[in-house]
Structure formats: structure tokens, C-alpha cells
Image: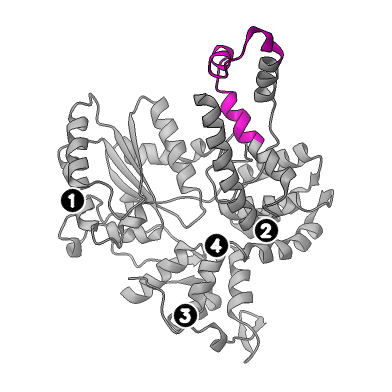
Amino acid sequence: MESKMEIKRVEKMTKEGWKLFALEAGLDENDAEQFAEQAAIGRWRYISQLTPKRLKEEFKLAPGDRDLLETFVEKAQKPVRRSWTFGTIIDPDVHFYVPFQQLVGDLVEKIVIPHKFALVQAPFRFGKTSHLIALEQVLNKQGFSTIKIYCQDSIIWTQEQFNELKERLRLEKKPPILLIDEFQRIAHSPDRNTTLSQLKEIRDFRLIGACLGFGTYSLIHLLDDTSHLKLSPFPNDPNSVIYLNALPSDGISAMFEEWSHERGRSITERAIRAIVEDTGGYPGLVGFVGVCLDNTLHPVIDLDQWEFERESCIESYTNTSQVKGLFHLFKSDVFRPILSKICASLSLTPTSPQELEYTLALADFGLLRRLKQERANDPPIFIITCSLFHHLLLSHYYLTQTPVNLQGMLITPDIQEHTLTHLPQLA
């Protein structure tokens, strides 16, 4: 009975996930055939974890139900049709993916082994959670124990929970590694200093071996400086700030080659190279491109076909919550000079704390990525993420009024149409 209830729970979660996926990908959420495939994946993957003995016991199968048992096992072992994802956690059995375990080696060498506290930064839909899970798996294989925390609220622990954690940590033979997801939720929280003080306490007493907080670029507000009264355990040191790298081009090529083989389609090397260049290896964009190509019926994707599909892919991407959030920022007057600078030079070095705050907001939504600083006092430098985001900026910020020539492109801004009566809450 317990297993049957678990399957219903999995199916319910799958249905909720399918609705979100369908909405973001521009698919029909009422498409029964596509949903049935997704639901079957969740149901049979759970069943596959059960041994034949547990199947008999938990599903109350009688000796005469051998055929049903064999059907369960057969379906559980049947390979599923893999799909693309651009906003959910990577599942190796279900998704096309680049092995994230191969991308987290630097985090082990530079942060975990030296027992550091570090902030791991990337924009929305860059695979931060998938990186965290991959790091956890790598660490566990290497003999490290880990504690994984997902920030659901503006504070991680109440004082009572923190006291219980300290007692538990003192009993550990080897200090575990603390991994925190969605850590940017702490950055502007009124309880920020409480959380930082708690982390500093368990660091000072060496109750954990290392700590990695994963989040967006807003994590900069958690670095230690005089404004935090030295409460933060995260030093204002470039070596303690990690920017996740884009997917490697050979990994992207391998994914599309696997996709073409499984779908019975053909995609040329030139088309794959163009996709790599257009997406800049941004994981969410690569996954979305895969979804779009899955929905086209053209049997051969060459460079010309990709350039044709590229426009519809960009248009579909504007319907995602990520780009809608970005366009919301475009509407605010305060972003006008910043966006003009970005269009003119494809990069930006903020010259004031306020401009830095607005730039971080654009970077969080994926328009910009931040370059690694060599020294703590070096000015922050941001560059455009990739040509697809540049296209979104040009086509949805500059419209049709006064002609302006920017780097050989004739574009016409219509600032008035993109003005809000209120500013986004960034502070």
C-alpha cells in the first residue's frame, strides 16, 4: 500500500512538473500523449528501484500474479525516451546532459580540500542545483560526508535548530561539507546577519570542513567587508568567489549527436557550432534550443535550417518566466543608460553602487555574465552572455522611433513604451 501511495505522489509531482514545463516550452499542457510519457517515466523509475521481493510484498502480489510481476520488471527496465530540460534538475536517466561531475573538480580542489568558505555564482537556469548535486555525489564518492540545505526562507536555522545542529556536528568524526542552494535568498534578508553569524560560528569552531553557497550574482552582498562588521565567514577574496563556467563545446556537441541518433534526425557540425556560439554554452539556453528542435519536423538541421529555427526559438524563449523578468527590468527608466552602454560596447563596468545593483539584477536574469577578478579591489566587469541574449536586448529594448547607429546596426529606440511608474525592488 505504501508503494502505491508513493507512485500516486510521484505521478502528482510529475503532473505539476509537466504543467510548468509545458507552459515554459510553449507546449499544450493538455496533450495527453506527451504527459502520459512523462508520467510513465516517473512511475516506472520508482518501480525500478524495487526488488522483485519488495514488489511482491508491497503490491501484495499472489503467486498467480507472476505475469504481472514480469510486466512490472519489464517496464521498469525499458529505456525511456530522453528529453531536454532547461529549468529542472538534471536526471541522467531522463535528460540529455553534460556530466556535471566533470565540471566540479575545481570546486573540490580549490574550496573543499583547503577547507574554505566560498560563494558559487551563476544566473538563473545555469544549472546551479545540478552542479551542487554533482558536487555532492563526487564528494561522497571521495569519502566526504555532506549536509545539503535548500534555502526556502530568508533564514536557514532558527536558534533552536542551530543549537541542535551544533550538537550533531560535534558528534561527527570528520567535519562534513556544507552545501547551500538558493543562497541568494539570504542576501537581502533582514535576518542576513544572524545567518552569517551562525555560519561564522561553526566555521570558527571547525564544526564543518568547508561551505559552498550556490546562488545568483546577488551573493556579492554576503562577502565580508566593513559594512557587515566582520560577521561574514565569506572573505572578500577573488579566490572565494567562484563563477560557474558555461558548458564545454565538446559536451554540447555530444548531446546533440546523441539526440540526432535517438530521434533518427541529422544535425551538421556547422549547425552545432552555431548553436554553441549563439547560446554561449548557457545550460538553460542549450536545453531550450533542444526543446525547439524536438518540435520541428525537419529531418536535417544544417546551418541554414538552424538560422531559420533560431528566430522561432528566440520568440518562444520570450515566453519563459526568466525572459519576462528580464523584460520587466527593461521597462524601468533607471535601466535606460545601463542598457544603452551594453548595446554600444557589449560590456559594462559599473561606476557606482547603485549602477552595480542594477547590473547585478540584469546578470541574475542571464543578460550579463561577470568576469573573474584577479584582485579584490579590481572593478567588476560584466559582458553580454551570448548572441541570443544580445538579440533579445536589441529586439525588445530598441524599437522604432529615432534611428540610432550602434556598431553598424540601425535600430530605433522607443523608450517611452518601456517606462514603468515604479522601480523594481532591488535594495
Q: Is residue 90 magenta?
A: no
Q: Which residues are magenta?
A: 40-67
Q: CA distance from mark 1 to mark 2?
A: 44 Å
User: In the rendered image, which residue does mark 1 sit on?
Assistant: 197
Q: Is 310 drawn above or below residue 108 in the view shown? A: below
Report x, y in % for residue 23: 62, 57
Judged from the image, the secondary structure of the residue bearing numbered disc 2 is loop
Q: Is 418 drawn above or below residue 135 in the view shown? A: below
Q: CA distance from mark 1 to mark 3?
A: 36 Å
Q: The disc labelled 4 sits on which kind of residue?
A: Ser
Q: CA distance from mark 2 to mark 4?
A: 12 Å
Find residue 332 and name its label. 3
Q: Earlier in the sequence, mark 3 or mark 2?
A: 2
Whether the residues at callouts 2 and 4 have beta carbons within 8 Å, the answer is: no
Whether the residues at callouts 1 and 4 have beta carbons within 8 Å, the answer is: no
Q: CA distance from mark 4 to mark 3?
A: 18 Å
Q: Earlier in the sequence, mark 4 or mark 3?
A: 4
